Amino acid sequence: MAGLNTSPGANPHTASRPGLRDQFSAVAWLRWRMLLNLLRSRRGTLEIASLVIFRGFFALIGLVMALGLGLGAWEFTSHGSLRLLAALLWPVFIVWQVIPVMLASFQENADLSFFLRFPLSFFSYVAFYLLFGIFDINSLIGGVALLGILIGVTVAQPSLFFVTLLALTVFAVFNILLTRMIFAWIERWLAQRKTREILGFLFLTVVLGLEFLNPALYGNPGHFHIFSHSTILRHFHGAILAQNFLPPGITANMLDFLHTGHFFLALANALFLLLYAAAAAQLLIVRLRAEYRGESLGQAPARIAKAAPRRRTLDGSGPLAAVIEKEIRYLMRSGVMLYQLLTPLFIVFIFSGHGTSPFGHQFSQEFALPLANAYGFLGLTRFLYNNLGAEGAGIQIYFLSPTPFRRVLLGKNIVHILIFVVEMLLVSTLVIFRSGMPSPQIILLTVCWLAFALPVQLAAGNYISMTMPYRINMARLGRRSGSAGNDLLSLLIEVLIVAAGAIVFIVLRFFGHPVLAAPVFLVLAAASILFWLRGLARSGRILAARKENLIATLYKTA
Amino acid sequence: MATPAISTQNLTRRFGDFVAVDDVSFEVAPGQFFGFLGPNGAGKSTTIKMLTGLLEPTSGHIEILGQPFNASALDLKRQIGVVPEGMALLSRLTASEYLRFVARMYGLDRDTANQRTSELLDFMQLANEPKKLITDFSHGMQKKLALAAAVIHGPKVLFLDEPFEGVDAIAAGTLKTMLQGMIARGATIFLTSHVLEIVERLCSHVAIIHKGRLVANGSLEELRVGVASTLPGSEQVEKLTLEEIFLNTVGAESAESVQELSWLA
């Protein structure tokens, strides 16, 4: 090994400490190559097409928002009422913070621990974490919306361009820091058994508490206008005062003070906003520092020193019971999965109340139940349409064992049905408390539609799970890369199922017999059950040609 | 001659234009400890995947215990155990939950599953971590668990893909003890490994695959004689190690190319 006999000190080409720019460009290059490599396969092309469609859709939402907010900003600035910009910044703030909750199943949240094997400084690690956040869907929408406000203000008063740009930039930075901080902490909490249980308990308490609060405030759900006009005004003024101390209000005040020449007050508000951003950054840094030091979210909760007495297993014997038991254990050990099941309940709660429907109270009371149930399916998307994704290398055990694969899928589907029943019961309870009891006809039609929708989703979910799987990290929020095609297809199928129900209902209602939709849905339900069972029976054959790809996809580590 | 425990005829697997396994035929007698060797990318894992139903052959024929084998031969699958590449562990279960799960997937009743789980965990020295999830196990512990899962249903034929990779000497000792016990009771073991010393110590028969083709097959003595006959000079047949046999059969990589990396410390 004569050629290798060189001392380290004599080597003139020892690697120097890489700079942030080098590392950024390396990661950018990596992602670009990964994108190009995706084009090599049909599935990869579909993946890219799906990403473009998703991003395009959300960019469109951002543009519509930007247009509306821009007009509002122009109007307020033209009349010298810059303080009212807060009314525009609040929706941006809410969208920025709420969308990650709504899209927890769909939004990619990269696991940066991958980069820790390289000589990455903590500063670079944080920078990477934030950089990945800039490309999130909520940042895309929020950024475009803020651009609309900037244009609106500038058109109305060009001299305000630079200060508005500065103020909105700080506001955007705060939003990015806040949303990334919330994500980082939620992931940590969900990874710990004890905090998961506490959060679950708190969640249920809050939801149940709100249920009781709702009738207590409104009395009879049918009577919304229990508050007098003056009471509403009083609450509104109180809210206005409070929002002066919150980021959207502070940003608007800052601009207003600058506009009216109160520079010290403007500076005070700017510092106040920076303080918020610094607080969010500090909390984020605390979390990221722990990750940087090697804490893994994949780790189990702290071990219990002494063995607990043996508990009875949930099963009878047999492979089907074994699969059901395993699926339930997996679900109960993944805070992330539970979180994804529960988030639709929050959204249903927010949007199912009186006065929240743009179509009016009558519409809200009549259709809140079917709409909320349709939305509730979103929480199940990952379970149904990527039901093998959590297996990892363990997928091989299903092929090695003498259990037919259809039985494995059946076991999984039984758990899905159980989850579905619980989810729909919770959603329906929320809706009934918030919007009032719908008519018996609507309840009947909703149940019949669900009887049709569920088997179709199970059948489609099984097929897509076998043909377009992607690996799930049970300790991480957000989707994995490689899942956009699966997401797009599953979303399309969900839309089609809702559309089918709506068309049947609308057509029959047009002819004056909406209740006839019930037998139609039941016939469709019978057909969809047959479709599902047929799919299960054929799963072995479907899988035969794709087994290798499935194993490779779920087994690969990154 | 007794019916072979494992038999392949003209086994071939192509991935597009690339031939990973090319016309491979061999037999493994019942009760044999069979080592299947080859350099990286030679086709070992592909072969073992075909033999266990994880991968469909492009052509050729497989028999296990005298019966044609394919992925849907469920009765045969009950008779074989496998430690596949990646170990097939379900990382969010505890060791005992995983073993009970696998036992039931192989059709064992609950009592038997519980009893064997308990015995295997004790034997593998995994019983003192009852609450620990598999994801938190060390690599060696995972290997032991994967082997326990492969044998829990009492297979007659055991396929092991790199069971000693990344395993410390203590864990390797435990695995070897178990495997030798199985051979003593008449089981057949098909093993791939890069640790040639272990293969040499355990296996009575060895096959070597290189670039998808079987280039050697026989007992260790037969391979020694075969290699010795190709060597110049008077090599003592009995002193030839498996490593020497292997390197002579597949050809060692050029050492000169390493010398080019003069920047290495």
Image: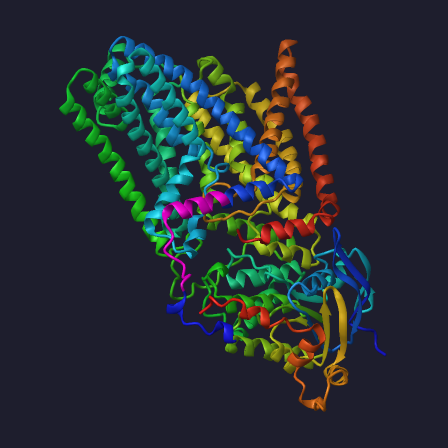
Q: Is residue B120 left or right of residue A238?
A: right
Residue at left offset 36%, top offset 36% = A179
Residue A22 within the magenta-colored segment of the rendering:
yes
Q: Is residue A235 above or below residue A375?
A: above
Q: How is the image coloured?
A: rainbow
x, y (%) of residue A20? 37, 47
Q: Residue at the location (59% across, 51% down)?
A: A554
Question: Would residue B203 be counted in the magenta stretch?
Answer: no
Quarter-of-image position of residue B43? bottom right
Q: Is residue A33 visible?
A: yes
The N terminus of chain B - image quarter: bottom right
Which part of the image, by quadrant, shows the C terminus of chain B? Answer: bottom left
Q: How far from the left and from the top, in percent, is residue A552?
A: 63, 52
Q: Position of residue A78 (x, y in %)?
A: 29, 9
Residue in the foreground of this view, choosing between B1 and A72: A72
Image side of residue A339 versus residue A486, left or right = left
Q: Front-most of A225 and B235? A: B235
On screen, residue B252 above or below A298: below
Residue B123 location, quadrant: bottom right
Q: Residue at x 43, y 27 (%)?
A: A141
Please report the residue visible at 45 percent of the width from the left and 42 percent of the height from the top. A109
- Judge from the rendering whether residue A509 lies leftward or rightward of residue B206; answer left or right: left
Q: Is residue A125 visible?
A: no
Name which quarter of the figure residue B87 lies in: bottom right
Highlighted range, magenta: A12-29
Relative placement, left or right, of B74 versus A222 is right
Number of numbered labels in the structure image: 0
Question: Residue lying furthest right in this view?
Answer: B1
In the rendered image, the vertical position of residue A359 relative to residue B92, given as above or below: above
Along the line of sight, the residue nearer the viewer: B141 or A253? A253
From the top left corner, tell me how far across and down residue A207 is, in percent: 38, 33
